[in-house]
Amino acid sequence: MDNLGLITPLLRSNTAAIVTNVTVAPLYLERFAAALAAAGVQCVQVVLPDGEAYKNWETLNSVYDRLLEAHCDRQTTIIALGGGVVGDIAGFAAATYQRGVSFIQVPTTLLAQVDASVGGKTGINHPLGKNMIGAFHQPLAVLADTSTLRSLPMRELRAGLAEVIKHSLIRDVVLFEWLEANLEKLLAREDAALVHAVLRCCEIKAEIVAADERETGERALLNFGHTFGHAIENAKGYGVWLHGEAVAAGMALAVDLSRRLGGLTAADAARVVELIARAGLPTAVRGVSPQQFTALMGLDKKAAAGRPRFIVLDRLGAASIRDDVSSGDLNDTLATAA
């Protein structure tokens, strides 16, 4: 984060708007803004409330208010300094402010560094569904400083591991086996392990996004566990479960469905659930009925004609999109969550 040579050449003017939240601001905002100011960059600061519950129109409008009050023009670059919620809101503001300005992602959480900041998805939640309002808007750069993970609460670190596990399951069995052997190093925040995990996940996601930026096909594989996970977040109330926690339980359900469809052996399914549990993440959810799951999954963006599509594993390290899941198999999987 102190290497401004990675940022300043990308700015279109000497004005940048740093969007962060009340949790990250005391840790990094002054240091980051001061470094930019020393390089001759005028910084507008936008500090948002923290949490998924604030990923809405009201918070987004507060970003527009601050940009307009500061007379930010089309040459202003918006810099997202924070986790996935900050990145999504700042990115959507950048996509829509004066019909689009440039932005840079500086993710400070593991989940954002390995997943949310990469790929250009931006947006906010709607009471009826997660990420229903948004735009594809690619950042000029994503600058992941793994030293910020030292200040991350353990619960947030574990939530980020859910996305690391996801990347291994859909594309890289070698990474999955590495996680089985090195999970404790990640939990201990060993620098080399964190760098390896962040780099490999970014490589995987960048490769998939480059082939299918707007999710007309292959990019949907990145939503493994998310069809179930988004339903869990909605049912429990946004912010009650962290996104990574909901994805972890969603992956456990997706693994169960994959086993029922013949893609995974029982032994491999057990390996996945064991790894999720070792990461300190939930492998089950209670209090969401199969009927509620079905209704909420029908609102998923990947649904076609109200029928959800599922990302399932054909084997460890390989996934596919299925729209032919029988109601019997789905109900049997959902029954495990009732």
Image (spheres, rainbow, N blue to C red):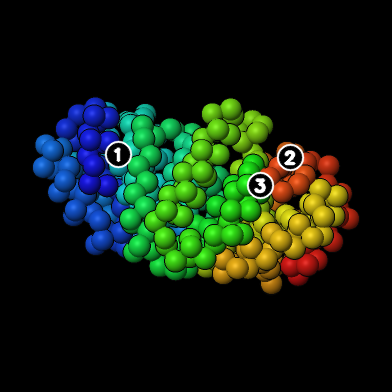
Which tag, 3 or 2, sits closer to the chain's start? 3
| Residue 289, picture quadrant | bottom right
Badge 2 crowding class, 10 Å Cα cut-off, few under 14, some 14 to 19, many 20 or more, is: some
Q: Is residue 59 visible?
A: no
Residue situated in front as seen by the camera: 272 or 179: 179
Position in image of residue 133 (x %, y %):
51, 43
User: Is 14 drawn above or below residue 292 in the view shown?
Assistant: above
Q: Earlier in the sequence, mark 1 or mark 3?
A: 1
Of the pair 227 and 148, the residue shown nearer to us: 148
Q: Earlier in the sequence, mark 1 or mark 2?
A: 1
Residue mark closest to the camera, 3 vs 2? 3
Check contact, mark 3 vs mark 2: CB within 8 A. Answer: no
In the picture of the structure, the residue carrying the numbered disc 1 is: 78
The 10 Å Cα crowd at callout 3, few under 14, some 14 to 19, many 20 or more, is some
What's the amino acid at mark 2? Ile
Q: Amino acid at mark 3?
A: Val
Q: Amino acid at mark 1?
A: Ile
Left or right, 185 with respect to 253, comes to left
Q: Nearer the viewer, mark 1 or mark 3?
A: 3
| Residue that lies at the very extreme toward the bottom in this rendered image | 287
Q: Tell me the residue that label 3 is attached to.
A: 173
Q: Is residue 167 above or below residue 23?
A: above
Of labels 1 and 2, the one closer to you? 2
Q: Disc 2 designates what residue?
A: 321
Which quarter of the figure is the C terminus placed in?
bottom right
Residue 272: where, in percent of width, then height? 69, 59
